[in-house]
């Protein structure tokens, strides 16, 4: 983070804390599913449905929230969303009590009792609240940092998400030893509400720009979606389409890691050990390996953020996906020693998740400032909804092909992502900003 002014550093920590909080909330429920299954006697498919509802809620509303992020002061939008999600977790904690008087509902032969219905509503609200982070956060970065430092800030912003992913399961593993599941979720929800209030108070300062650029100039309504699509084909429509396909194809591989890496490591390696008279089972070791992948992604994003400021984002994207492909293929084909496995997983996590600063910088560079909230909202909505079925499809693939063969097939995702980046080197698809002055036909 060298080279940043004090104001930029303070802003980076502030906006990145919202991304950290988003991913903390995202990871609350999965570690508690075994506990909820015993305590509430819900089948696993119902508990999985709660996570699906969160994803749907978050995916659907990012696009309309992107429109709002380009029209209203983000100091109101971002804290409100995070506080709303915290409040929804408070609702979740009290769901068994609040849902008790509600009648059960039967859907396709399955009975959903009142407590579950309250939990389902709470998870939809959690997703809606957290959906504001991307469309509000990215434009605020553009408005508050020097263009020469944007990659560094995007790297920090992206790394904070992986730290949130890794920190939440670890924290819940400790809390579950002393608190009930209701107390854990209540504590996290209350902290979320208080964080939202604190974030609002911090953003009230005139030190940070939170008003959308299209609203800061009187009479400037900003560019419209139809104008961008119709008039800016090689400077917006075609490259953004390539980036969307990049999202989806690389996301197929990342879903194979985030959803099934622990299961892969238990089935293929089943590493365990004894330490101080305590047996550390294969599942615990696999969780440790998984945490390493996420931490590798965080560390790599911090480094590649600065690299993105110095080199072409397309080159960084291609290198990351190439490295991730090598990691996936090595994981699928070779019998790895524990030390070698650690190295391969670090490479895989770094390539697969280190890509975010360059990817996000490219989206930001393609998008007019007055449209940036919508651009990030649209692309995250489209990518989230498109990939919603990936965990189910990948699980089916791994079950029928076997773990190693299935992972080898899933490496196709990063190969296709490299192909998407290659398209961005064609002037038929993308005309960079530096070339537009010399290419008067650049926008068709």
Image (tube, rainbow, N blue to C red):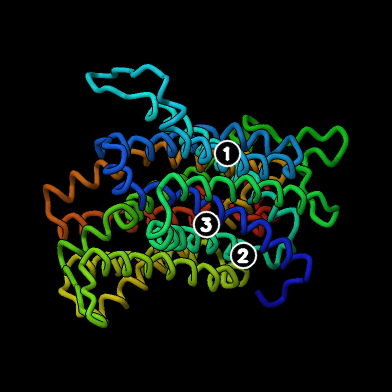
Q: Measure the C-alpha gap from mark 3 to mark 2.
A: 10 Å
User: On the picture, is 73 further left or further right than 248?
Assistant: right
For marks 1 and 3, the one nearer the N-term is 1
Q: Is residue 222 above or below residue 140?
A: above
Q: Which mark is residue 151?
A: 2
**In the picture, residue 168 is in which quadrant?**
bottom left
For marks 1 and 2, the one nearer the N-term is 1
Of the pair 331 and 122, the residue shown nearer to us: 122
For mark 1, give the secondary structure: helix
Q: How many marks?
A: 3
For mark 3, give the secondary structure: helix
Expressed as whole percent of the image width and height from the top left, the position of residue 427 reads 53, 52
The residue that appears at 59% across and 65% down in the rendered structure is 156
The reply to whether dot 3 and dot 2 touch (C-beta < 8 Å) is: no
Expressed as whole percent of the image width and height from the top left, the position of residue 440 reads 68, 48
- In the picture of the structure, the residue carrying the numbered disc 1 is 87
Asked if one can make out residue 322 in the rendered structure from this viewpoint, the answer is no
User: On the picture, is 194 further left or further right than 384?
Assistant: right
Q: Measure the C-alpha gap from mark 1 to mark 3.
A: 32 Å
Asked if one can make out residue 21 in the rendered structure from this viewpoint, the answer is yes
Q: Measure the C-alpha gap from mark 1 to mark 2.
A: 33 Å
For marks 3 and 2, the one nearer the N-term is 2
The residue that appears at 57% across and 39% down in the rendered structure is 87
- In the picture of the structure, the residue carrying the numbered disc 3 is 359
The residue that appears at 21% across and 79% down in the rendered structure is 274
């Amino acid at each position: 983070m060298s080279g940043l002014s004090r104001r930029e550093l303070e802003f980076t920590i502030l906006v990145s804390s919202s991304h950290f909080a988003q991913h903390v909330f995202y990871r609350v429920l999965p570690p508690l599913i075994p506990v909820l299954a015993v305590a509430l006697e819900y089948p696993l498919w119902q508990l999985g449905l709660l996570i699906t509802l969160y994803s749907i809620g978050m995916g659907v509303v990012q696009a309309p929230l992107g429109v709002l992020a380009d029209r209203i002061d983000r100091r109101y939008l971002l804290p409100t969303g995070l506080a709303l999600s915290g409040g929804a977790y408070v609702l979740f904690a009290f769901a068994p009590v609040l849902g008790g008087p509600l009648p059960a509902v039967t859907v396709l032969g399955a009975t959903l009792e009142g407590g579950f219905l309250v939990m389902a509503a709470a998870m939809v609200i959690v997703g809606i609240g957290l959906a504001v982070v991307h469309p509000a956060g990215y434009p605020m970065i553009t408005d508050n940092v020097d263009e020469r430092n944007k990659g560094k800030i995007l790297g920090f912003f992206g790394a904070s998400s992986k730290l949130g992913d890794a920190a939440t399961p670890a924290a819940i593993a400790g809390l579950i030893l002393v608190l009930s599941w209701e107390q854990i979720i209540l504590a996290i929800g209350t902290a979320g509400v208080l964080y939202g209030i604190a974030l609002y108070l911090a953003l009230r300062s005139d030190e940070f720009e939170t008003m959308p650029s299209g609203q800061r100039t009187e009479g400037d309504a900003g560019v419209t979606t139809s104008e961008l699509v119709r008039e800016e084909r090689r400077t917006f429509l075609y490259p953004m389409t390539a980036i969307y396909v990049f999202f989806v194809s690389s996301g197929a591989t990342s879903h194979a890691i985030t959803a099934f890496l622990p299961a892969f490591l238990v089935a293929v390696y089943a590493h365990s050990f004894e330490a101080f008279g305590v047996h550390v089972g294969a599942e615990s070791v696999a969780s440790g390996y998984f945490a390493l992948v996420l931490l590798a992604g965080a560390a790599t994003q911090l480094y590649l953020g600065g690299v993105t400021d110095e080199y072409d984002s397309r080159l960084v994207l291609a290198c990351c996906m190439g490295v991730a492909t090598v990691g996936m293929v090595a994981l699928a084909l070779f019998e790895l020693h524990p030390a070698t496995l650690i190295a391969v997983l670090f490479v895989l996590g770094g390539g697969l998740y280190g890509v975010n600063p360059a990817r996000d910088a490219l989206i930001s560079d393609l998008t007019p400032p007055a449209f940036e909230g919508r651009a990030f909202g649209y692309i995250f909505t489209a990518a989230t909804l498109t990939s919603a079925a990936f965990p189910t499809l990948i699980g089916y693939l791994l079950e029928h092909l076997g773990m190693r063969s299935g992972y080898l097939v899933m490496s196709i995702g990063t190969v296709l992502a490299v192909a998407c980046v290659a398209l961005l080197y064609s002037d038929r698809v993308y005309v960079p900003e530096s070339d537009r002055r010399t290419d008067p036909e650049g926008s068709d």
